[in-house]
Each structure stands twice: as structure tokens, then as C-alpha cells.
């Protein structure tokens, strides 16, 4: 037990999910070391969001995968082995606070949770306002020329998907990983309002011209 007092926990940074995907995973000796975001080296994270999906394995290999959404994007929470018992009661639809360790495997950044605790839904807004005070809006730091380039990329993806009957918004976000999901959703909304694209069904967009 004497060693416990010497153990130093990494800071659990409060972020939006979209911020995570703006960071750069740093790999050392073929293992994820930390997420580089600005001047921060992030290992642990503190998020508030809604559990929008849950999958629990039934085979020999036991695991639970959750999908967390905070309005800016979605990220997976992956629980393995003995930790499963701690999170069995967490269900789809709950608003939760998640504290955990970032992992990166097979080109996916996800969270291995230490804590998943139910919260009142109002804390989603509280956290959003808290983070807006801590840092300026990212869009204000993006040059006008960059926004135009992002709009062109989004529109090109939508046009190119016409033969397949359109494209899911999530696919656009995945293809434009270097851009914040908040900015992508903002530009898609503008295209919809301008009548350049339309939604044949929620989450899917098509080119109208």
C-alpha cells in the first residue's frame, strides 16, 4: 500500500468530444503514448454526454462498448474483463460523466473508462458553457480561406455520393478528420438553409444544386 501514495494520476482534462479528434495521437514503440492537443499532452479525460448506444458481448471474450455523444461528436467507451461488472447498470439514454484513459488502436481513438456516473441532463449545457468560457470559439481562429476550403470539401463529398443516393453526415465527419465536427455540422446546416442540399432522411444529405 505504501506505493499508492507515490502514484501520480494524470490530469483528467475537461474537453468536448470534437476537441479529441482535433488532437494528434502520439505513438511510441508502437503503443499510444498521449494525445497532443495544442500545448497539452493528454492521457486522461473528463467528458459529459449521453449514452446513445450499448453493446455487450455474449461470447467467451467479455466486453461492453458504449457510444458517448455530447453534441459535438461521438466517441467509443470500451470496457474489458473485470471492469465490466462496474458498468453493467449503465444503459442507453443516460446522461453521464465519464473519466477515463484515452487509447488508440487500429486508427481509432477511444476511452477506457475508470468512472461512468449518471448525471442530470442539465450538466451537458453546464459543461458546454464552462468550456466556452475557458477557451475561445474555435471557429474564430479559422481563417476565412480555410472555411471556404472546408465548405468545398464537404460539397464535393456530397456531390460525389449522388450515385449512391447521398451520404451520411457521420461519413463526412470521418472523411474530414482534421476538421471539427462542430464546424462540419455548422456548414452542412448552412447548405440546407440555402437549399443547396437536402435531407432525404435524418442524418443523410443529398446534393440539390
Image: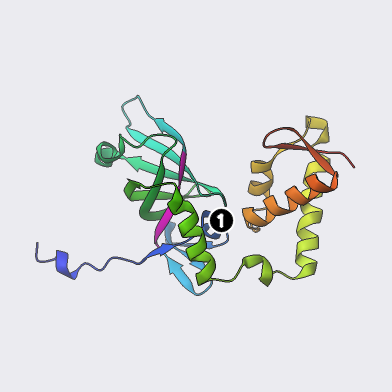
Q: Quadrant of residue 170?
A: top right
Does residue 126 sit above or below 89 in this rendering?
A: below
| Residue ID at (56%, 49%) | 73
| Residue ID at (35%, 67%) | 11
| Residue ID at (58%, 61%) | 22
**Residue 129 relative to residue 194: left or right:** left
Residue furthest out toward the right:
209
Residue furthest out toward the top:
58
Residue stretch in magenta: 43-51
Location of residue 203 in the rendering, given as x and y in whole percent from the top left corner: 67, 37
Within 10 angstroms of label 1, few (less than 14), some, or many (20 or more) residues?
A: many
Q: Is residue 45 visible?
A: yes
Query: At numbered mark 1, what does the secondary structure look like: helix, strand or loop?
Result: helix
Inspect the magenta stretch and tell me whether residue 82 lies in it.
no
Does residue 206 sit above or below 128 in this rendering?
A: above
**Residue 40 relative to residue 118: left or right:** right
Location of residue 66 in the rendering, given as x and y in whole percent from the top left corner: 43, 39
Residue furthest out toward the bottom:
39
Q: Quadrant of residue 19?
A: bottom right
Does residue 192 sit above or below 21 in this rendering?
A: above
The residue identified by callout 1 is: 18
Query: Nearest the camera: 140 or 128?
Result: 128
**Residue 6 relative to residue 179: left or right:** left
Look at the magenta stretch and give its main secondary structure.
Answer: strand
Location of residue 15 in the rendering, given as x and y in whole percent from the top left corner: 48, 61
Amino acid at each position: 500500500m505504501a506505493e499508492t501514495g507515490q502514484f501520480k494520476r494524470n490530469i483528467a482534462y475537461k474537453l468536448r468530444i470534437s476537441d479529441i479528434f482535433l488532437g494528434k495521437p502520439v505513438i511510441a514503440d508502437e503503443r499510444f503514448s498521449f494525445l497532443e492537443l495544442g500545448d497539452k499532452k493528454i492521457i486522461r479525460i473528463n467528458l459529459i454526454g449521453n449514452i446513445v448506444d450499448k453493446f455487450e458481448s455474449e461470447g467467451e471474450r467479455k466486453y461492453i462498448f458504449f457510444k458517448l455523444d455530447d453534441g459535438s461528436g461521438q466517441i467509443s467507451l470500451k470496457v474489458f474483463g473485470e471492469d465490466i461488472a462496474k458498468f453493467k447498470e449503465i444503459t442507453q439514454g443516460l446522461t453521464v460523466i465519464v473519466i477515463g484513459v484515452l487509447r488508440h488502436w487500429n486508427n481509432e481513438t477511444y476511452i477506457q473508462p475508470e468512472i461512468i456516473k449518471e448525471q442530470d441532463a442539465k450538466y451537458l449545457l453546464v459543461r458546454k458553457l464552462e468550456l466556452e468560457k475557458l477557451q475561445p470559439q474555435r471557429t474564430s481562429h479559422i481563417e476565412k480561406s480555410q472555411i471556404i476550403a472546408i465548405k468545398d470539401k464537404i460539397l464535393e463529398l456530397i456531390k460525389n455520393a449522388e450515385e449512391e443516393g447521398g451520404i451520411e453526415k457521420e461519413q463526412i465527419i470521418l472523411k474530414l478528420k482534421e476538421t471539427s465536427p462542430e464546424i462540419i455540422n455548422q456548414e452542412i446546416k448552412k447548405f440546407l438553409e440555402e437549399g443547396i442540399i437536402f435531407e432525404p432522411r435524418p442524418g443523410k444529405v443529398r446534393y440539390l444544386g
